Amino acid sequence: MIAWRLLVREFSSGQLTLLAVALLVSVAAMTTTAVLTDRIDRAMRADAATLLGGDLKLIGPRPPDLPWLKKAESLGLEHTETIEFPSVVGFGGRFELSGLKMVSQDYPLRGQLEISDQKAGVGYPVREIPAPGTAWADPQLAAKLDLNTGDVISVGETVLEITQILIFEPDRGGSFVSLTPRLLMNRADLAASELIQPGSRVRFITLFAGDRASTFRDWVEPRLDISQRLRGVVDGRPEVGGALKRATTYLSLAGLLTVLLSGAAIAMTATRWANDHIGDSALFRTLGLSGRETTRIFAWELAILGAAASLFGVILGYLIQFALVDTIAGMLTISLPMPSFYPAFLGLLTGFVILFGFATPALVTLSRVPPIRVFKRDYAVGGASWFLRYGMAMSSIAALGYLYSEDWRLTAWVLLAVVLLFFLVSIIGRLVIKALGPLEHLGPAWRFGIQQLIRDPAASGGQLMAFALTALAIAMVSLVRFDLITTWEAQVPKDAPNTFVLNITDADGPEFVELVKARGGQLAPLYPIVRGRLETVNGIRLSEHLKGQEAPGSVRRELSLTEASTLGLDNRIDRGRWFRAGDAPGLVTIESKLFDKLNLVLGDQLNYQIGPDLISAKVIGTRVVQWDSMLPNFFMIFSPETLRPFESTSLTSIRLRDPVSDTVAISNSFRQVTLLSVDAILNQVRGILDRVSQAVTVVLYFVVVGGVLVLAASVQTSLPERRKESAILRTLGGSDRLLSQSQWAEFLTLGVLSGLLAAAGTELLGWLVYTHIFNLQWQSLWMIWVLLPITNGLVVGTIGRWSAKEARRLPPAQLLKIAET
Amino acid sequence: MGPSGAGKSTLLSLLAGLDVPESGEIRFQGNAFSQLSEDARAGLRRGQIGFVFQSFQLLQGLTALENVMLPLELSGLPVKQARHRGLDWLNRVGLGKRVSHRPRMLSGGEQQRTALARAFVTDPALMFADEPTGNLDRRTGQAVNDLLFELNAETGATLVLVTHDEQLAARCQRILELENGQLLEVSA
């Protein structure tokens, strides 16, 4: 086949090297990013799954149907069932309402239980559950009943021996749902306890784990009834779920930007390839081939090249990521699973899509070369239409962008930013290049360098776009990483409360505060809690007010109502206002999302049923609440004195210096106060966020390396012209210094200019991505307007000079020979 | 003169200091090329040696005028004066109306005439021409040759010319033939 023979010949002559290398580097870069992000993503999810005890959690009032379990097994998922319900535990004549949790073998599927051999002891992880006839009590229960290992407790109709103190259960969570003291026991003891009676509030929890958990989720979700809930890591544990979601989006963004960088490199090298082949195409036409036959030869040549370069690119990509993981192994505390084959498939597909997406216009150009071009080199060749040129490139980037990010919105925003950047470069970039004239007065080196840019606006525009894209990509991934990590650090600050406190009576309040402070602890405000139900809106029953819509779960049952004079640090008023000094009782602020779900407007009058009484309150503001802050938070907060007539106990969160011993001491002084240490959970969340941060940082480094490679590749595309120009200048007596300085001037200018354009692009994409994708607040940074031009100028200048070094070093006669072959 | 592959162009490159010989020595104005750095050799060429190549070797990004101005700018002449002299030389080679055209918009003959203007603009003492009409049709080639010899006579430069063309060679004062690595005097 002629295309194959041509390819081999061209390859050995070096004509194809540039395009092949660009494709190889692109596919390798994208495969590396894809494999790395795939592995990091799976590792993060597995890590976070320890917070759930599995990859999926099915919660319901009865065990799941047998066919569901069969389906899970057929998908290769493990499963285990736990049963939770509140009941009374007795010891030494005292009784305590506790959360009983009965577990079976294999629990937990992800993460580990931690136990201690004695009260206030140090925990260690175990891979076992309490044996039948025994139970593990948490420190809270142990403190309340003054239990120690070896004691025998009564649970329903049975007795169990406490063999361990339960320090940590991975899936307990840090919310108020799980605040009661915990007793962990074996499922086998359920029947003997005779605790489950008709009407018991029992929760059957089935944990699932395995690679195909999401397939199972898709299958089972439509089959759930209203009483059943299915939770994954993201929705099941909001304190890390949000971070995980953002980190995954970050990985997608990084993948998308790598696609863009590769596209830029291929577009540049493919145009060069087409220019190199105009003469060949004319020759084929002279030899009697039709335009279509000529195109077919070149298309085959590209296809074979695409296949070979993609294959080697994929292999190289896998090798690089192995090397990368080896290098960073010491830095990562997360263990990565083995890579899957999906990125390999993606890499191969990428090679073809990107090659044809960006090289088709070049093929069209080649098909239009008239035979007369053999004789008249100056005969103009009609290129591809504007639509074909940019339409193909954008569609292939959109397709690949989606494949890499699986996020249409993110892909659309990034594409929009690229289109705008493109117009910015085309219009402003070229205008500015033309206006660079005055720089020529800086001396002959500057004159040559700047003239180089001014004389070929199309070529300088292309390089400007490539450099600006690279800078934009690196700036974006750096900024998002910085802001994500800052957000995560703020989410669980070093001094975050580590203990929740419930049931503080008014009488105990002052002494309790005193004791906590005496032990060096810090307290959040005390919130009085009254249970009540929302009944009417402006006198209309809630169900009628919602016009048949189902009320949100939080108002279908009794709510924890509270009052406060100061707004919590993790709350922000987004509509209306917070209470002022002098406000009368009877005002309420509502959590913003609930306010919308309830179709409320400011000024609405709400009525609540509290025991036998009714109270009324006017809505004056809504609050955006950071639910993952580990501080007490409420849907409804009333103005001070509103709840005064009702009997209440208070809750708060505190930070204890030594959670284990302080909890025991405080519990002993205030027996009715419930203390729940969330220190272990906090540490667990902090650890996961740390690891997610590391993962995000590693990907950032990789994008930077990829960006620099693309930068070098795009400089390389102009090398043949540079060689020739250097040779001619040297022949005419130009010194090495002059050549070097003029290249420095040219690339420095290109770098600074592209840095400025990238800063504009970053402002735009940053705003789009922050507000629409990451739900972060975008703040315009003057730093990027200074740092991007400076660093980009230095980096592009250095790479440009370094790449063009050969063009200065070789004797002119040799350079001319190279240029003419 | 000499058959293809005899090493004529290599010899020309060596004579001009565009490359250095593996053995032996070439001196220009008392300086041995092989003992000089690339920069020093470039310095010697600047303004003193002119070139005309078979494939013109014009910078594609520059206009005809800018190509002609280039050697003057490299020797440090202010842009205004360089432009003035460049225009003058383009007029002399008959391209006064094509000054702003880039090489790819000029015919082969016009490109070579631009190259001639570039070679002579610095008023060099020594001029090298490597098959100057090898890429042109006979009639255009003839016209370019005429111009080359005319300008050479006007400036009084020493012209070293490599060619296959016996008629062209016959117009030179001295003919040497390169064969099997040996340089033979054909006529003087």
Image: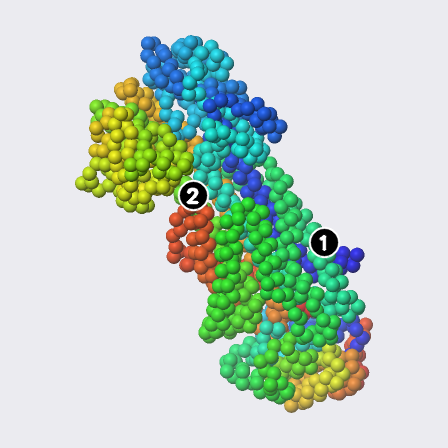
Relative to A175, is A440 on the left or the right? Answer: right
Of callouts 1 and 2, the N-terminal one: 1
> In the rendering, at what x and y percent does residue B42 appear?
60, 73
Q: Residue at x 47, y 25 (%)?
A: A60
Q: Amino acid at mark 2?
A: Ile
The verdict on a common chain for dots 1 and 2 is yes
**Quadrant of res A8:** bottom right
Q: Secondary structure at mark 2?
A: helix
> In the rendering, at what x and y percent does residue A375 appear?
73, 75
Q: Amino acid at mark 1?
A: Ile
Chain holding disc 1 = A
Chain holding disc 2 = A
Q: Secondary structure at mark 1?
A: helix
Mark 1, Cα crowd under 10 Å, few <14 / some 14-19 / many 20+, is some
Between the residue at mark 1 and the residue at mark 2, the CA separation in whole angstroms equals 44 Å
> In the rendering, at what x and y percent does residue A527 appear?
27, 31
Relative to A63, is A681 on the left or the right? Answer: left
- Give the labeled residue for mark 2: A485
Point out the image quarter for the C terminus of chain B: bottom right
Mark 1 vs mark 2, foreground winner is 1
Q: Residue at x 39, y 49 (%)?
A: A777
